[in-house]
Image (tube, coloured by chain):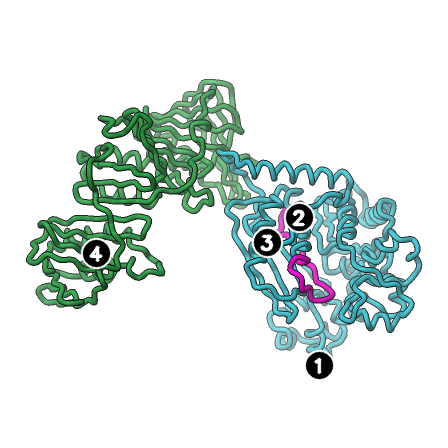
Amino acid sequence: MDAFFASVEQLDNPSLRGKPVLVGHDGPRGVVAAASYESRKFGCRSALPMAIAKRLCPQAIIVPVRMHRYLEMSDRVFAIFDEFSPLVEPLSVDEAFLDLNGTERLQGAPEAVARRMKKRIRDETKLTASIGVAPNKFLAKLASDLEKPDGLTIVHAEDVDHILPPLPVSKLWGIGRVTEAKLESVGIRTIADLRRVPRELLERHLGSEAERYWNLAHGIDHRVVTPDRDAKSIGHEQTFEVNVADPDEIRVVLMDQVEHVAQRLRKHGIQARGISLKIRYGDFQTITRSRTLATSTNSTQELWQAARDVFNEWPFQPVRLIGVSAERLSSGDEQMPLFTDPERERQKKLDAVADQINQKFQKRTIGRGVRPK
Amino acid sequence: MKVICNRGALLEALTVAGNVVAARTPKPVLQCVKLTAADDRLTIAATDLEVAIRYSDPQVQIEQPGEVLLPADKFRDIVRESIDDTLSIEVVNDQAHIKGQDSHFKIYTQAVSDFPPVPDFEGEPDFEVPGGLLKQLIGQTLFAAARESTRYAFNGVLIVAKNKKLNLVSTDGRRLAMAKSDLAANGKLGKDGAQAIVPAKALNLVDKLIDDPEEPVQFQMRENQIIFHTSSATLTSNLVEGQFPPYEDVIPKDADKTMTAATADFLSAIRRAALLTTEESKGVRMSFTKKGLQLTSRSPESGEAEVNFACKFDGADVEIGFNPTFLTEALRVVDSDEISLELTAPNRPGLLKGGQNFLYVIMPVNLQ
């Protein structure tokens, strides 16, 4: 989706349309969560400190993050994805991979499918999406970024040798600032540079990752599209613009994440046997803590209890990132219980009703709250 | 204290007591056994504060009565590794001297007064059961109890003594085993009888204590303890707290389909069909018709299994999934050559019966 958070804000508030909009906290330590295309002309982009963004684009209108609303819109967009492929791998709230293999006879050529999908998204949500169509995940993601906003880019296997070489190495999946700097220090700036380096030399600079990057540089990527139902874990995480010092505030976010994860589990008839929390503190120390559940479950309440217990167990410090994921997933044969657990039955009904309501209105109409501790 | 012991008998006593000794505990005293030499016997006592045992070893010669507290594992290792037929144990001040013909071990003892009291069997038993029968009742139920359920009552076996009947019941929430027996006499039990949930660990030990099937095991049931007594040992256990689930309500009474088969053949058929189950698809599909039973299983990675089992089946055709392990575990403890499996519907429990006295309720698996 194009400038997703900012576009949703412009959609909800017509006075913002056509104007530079920055989503994020307007404080000394605030960070831009999303920048509208109008503001990008001035150099604004997400992850930029708000203070710098304001200097670049003083006329920008700054609005706070409304994650709940974005998740509602995200659900609607994902519902559209599901219409086009049985294999949808969510990448974030506003990005996904769709495997169109084997759908040609039913839906026609991928380019036409992409066009129809863009139209469906625009009609349904009034938002624009950029789509990349390519033989693998790496190229598709790359293609989707080439003609933003409202883009549609097709990359054929034979295009690889003229599209990739001029691009900077940072376009390769997994190359971040550190690796980029390391490569630059030995004179590798573009994908063309990287392609020229002998494999052995590349291995010396990149270690075990060398082969993967070499493959990507040649447009080779064997990863398959993994939908939730085949995933090893299903999770959500959120980075805050500032360190959040109030544990209750974190609990509210955590509950929201658990609910979203539990819904995804139920949607695919998956049960989780474990839950894992990722917490990054203000000092950037990151911990991951897991817990095994007594029985497999996809109940919001049971997953929440486990997540909350793990969270409460650790001495609280201001938090920069919180994430939760359901693990040890199974969708196999389900052993029925001999004795009904009245509470479990009640929760099951509650979840089913909430799912129905949210499905009917295609958004997160109903959700749980957290009682302050 | 000074005693001369038969090494084999002492080792047996220490091995039994060793099952009670706490493995990990913040109280080091619980990793000891207490030896008491008196009345022509050596009594070995151990406790983990949940289960306590007194085991008496008569194959001793007491030179000087007394008592001592010794570290259980070291003492047992010395007795096991020794090569003598007899060992002498003598306590001098706070040291125990264990002597064989060519060996002499000195172990530091701990203060006997620090050891928690280990109850003895006093007074009349509430009732008694022949050892062999109790062993069978335990064998037919203990396996179906849960190990680490958060519903504590599932981690024990319910013992119900009432109206000259003794029944044991266990469940892990997915299957339930019940073994029934007759009591020769009601003993001291009142009209309402008595019932208690006994931890799996304690029953496992009782099972090990029984070696003569004819010899009776005596029971005393108290408010929050149960005491078992054999000629050589007294075992006291705290009861599992919590409410045992309403097990009588889940025993199917309206089954309208019945399979009958030879126990060993049915067991073999299930074991073969289960060879291609996996963690993901652990159910075996069982399709019952007039012609018999077809068992199938499927493992997404490996392949498929099909076993056509000739058996008698009365009632409308039905297809149902079961966890094969739950069935084989029960079939192994059935003591009759023929079993029956009563069914109602694919989402209702099945009832396995073996002989007059064994019932097993098993909840199906929802096959994908």
Residue A228 magenta-highlighted: yes
Which residue, given by chain and number where applicable, does mark 1 sit on?
A185
Q: In which quarter of the image is the N terminus of chain B?
A: bottom left
Q: Decide which of tag 1 and tag 3 comes sooner along the chain.
A: 1
Question: What is the C-alpha distance between the residues marked 4 and 3?
Answer: 45 Å
Q: Is residue B296 visible?
A: no
Q: What element carries label 1?
A: helix
Name the kind of residue labelled 4 in the image.
Lys
Residue A51, image x and y in percent?
82, 72
Image mark 3: chain = A
Name the kind of residue labelled 3 in the image.
Arg
Residue A329, image x and y in percent?
57, 48
Q: What element carries label 3?
A: helix
Question: Which mark's residue is nearer the viewer, 2 or 3?
Answer: 3
The mark found on residue A259 in the picture is 2
Q: Which of A179 and B60 is in front in this view?
A: B60
Which residue, given by chain and number where applicable, does mark 4 sit on?
B34
Name the kind of residue labelled 1 in the image.
Ser
Q: What element carries label 4?
A: strand
Question: What is the C-alpha distance between the residues marked 1 and 2?
Answer: 45 Å
Image mark 2: chain = A
Residue A288, image x and y in percent?
58, 62
Name the kind of residue labelled 2 in the image.
Glu
**Which range of residues does the magenta coloring cover?**
A226-250
A10 w.r.t. B361: above or below: below
In the rendered view, does B292 fall on the left or right side of B101? right
In the rendered view, does A197 fall on the left or right side of B232? right
Disc 1 packing (10 Å; few <14; some 14–19; many ≥20):
few
Q: In which quarter of the image is residue A218?
A: bottom right
Which residue, given by chain and number where applicable, does mark 3 sit on?
A308
Image point (75%, 43%), residue name? A365
